[in-house]
Amino acid sequence: MKLIICKDKFSLAQAASEKAATAIRNAQLTNGKARIIAATGAAQFEFLDALTSLQGVDWKKVTMFHLDEYIGLSDSHPASFVKFLQDRLTGKAGIKDTHFLSAEEDLAVVIRRVGEALSSAPIDVAFVGIGENGHLAFNDPPADFETEEPYIVVNLDEACRRQQLGEGWFRSLSDVPRQAISMSVKQVMKAKEIICIVPDARKAEAVRACFEGEISPLAPASILRTHPNTTVYLDTHSAALLKPSTKELRFGS
């Protein structure tokens, strides 16, 4: 794992998007197509805007998998991650081969169908973030590091739910769902390459816990340190609490 610290979230987005585009192009050259996992949330705004603005990416040869989704929201709800991805990635880029976790369908059917498609071939690159509580996807602490299931139903802890409220997706904490479908930790880690986008000061404590503490289910994204082809993009605000020595480290490579 490699840490890259950028001046601000805009330079972070540009650097991460160029890395992502290269991964997609390389997969298409090798396999004729690229299979990607896409994250959501406010931290991904600038990255997805930069990525969909780049030239030379053949989006028609991309298959996209959904990382996580609330249980109980319609796909048209402002906080729906289906809507988020349609508005900010698939619709803008023109990706047609999509595997959404629609909350409007039968839960077991969605988990089985998308999980089978996800497991049918390797993922070339996964775009992820880190939550304010250190979560990876919606795997809040203590995360399940052992399950082999591609997708699982998870309970969202209060810190996670407050983050969603703070980002402006909901009017009150009581409106934030208490459960979600999440890609499992092991499934995320099966991706050939992981690009982790983590801007903003509100993520600084989680970044320190994940990259200076123990690798533990209590800091779920700490598991990224064991992946040999992960690049974590931070800005000066999200990296503010890291020791100078940590900023120079490469883990698991």
Image: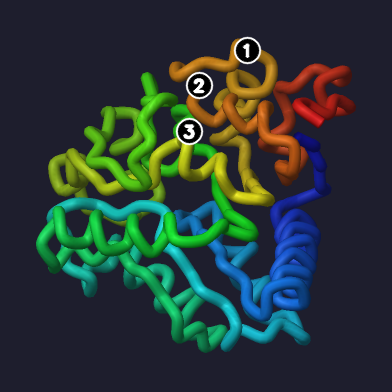
34, 38: nearer the viewer: 34
Which residue carries the number 2 mark? Answer: 219
Q: In which quarter of the image is residue 110?
A: bottom left
Q: Which residue is drawn at 45% across and 86% down?
A: 96
Q: Residue at x 70, y 53 (%)?
A: 9
Which residue carries the number 3 mark? Answer: 132
Q: For the residues marked 2 and 3, what is the alpha-carbon distance in whole angstroms? A: 10 Å
Which residue carries the number 1 mark? Answer: 213
* Labels 2 and 3 touching (C-beta < 8 A): no
Q: For the residues marked 1 and 3, what is the alpha-carbon distance in whole angstroms? A: 15 Å
Q: Which residue is drawn at 67% across and 80% down?
A: 32
Q: In which quarter of the image is the C terminus?
A: top right
Where residue 197 sits: x, y (%)? 64, 49
Upstream in the sequence, badge 1 or badge 3? 3
Where residue 218 sits: x, y (%)? 45, 17
195, 160: nearer the viewer: 195
Q: Quadrant of residue 154?
A: top left
Q: Residues within 10 Å of mark 1 (few under 14, many from 20)?
A: few
Residue kind at label 2, given as amino acid type = Ala
Q: For the residues marked 2 and 1, what is the alpha-carbon distance in whole angstroms? A: 8 Å
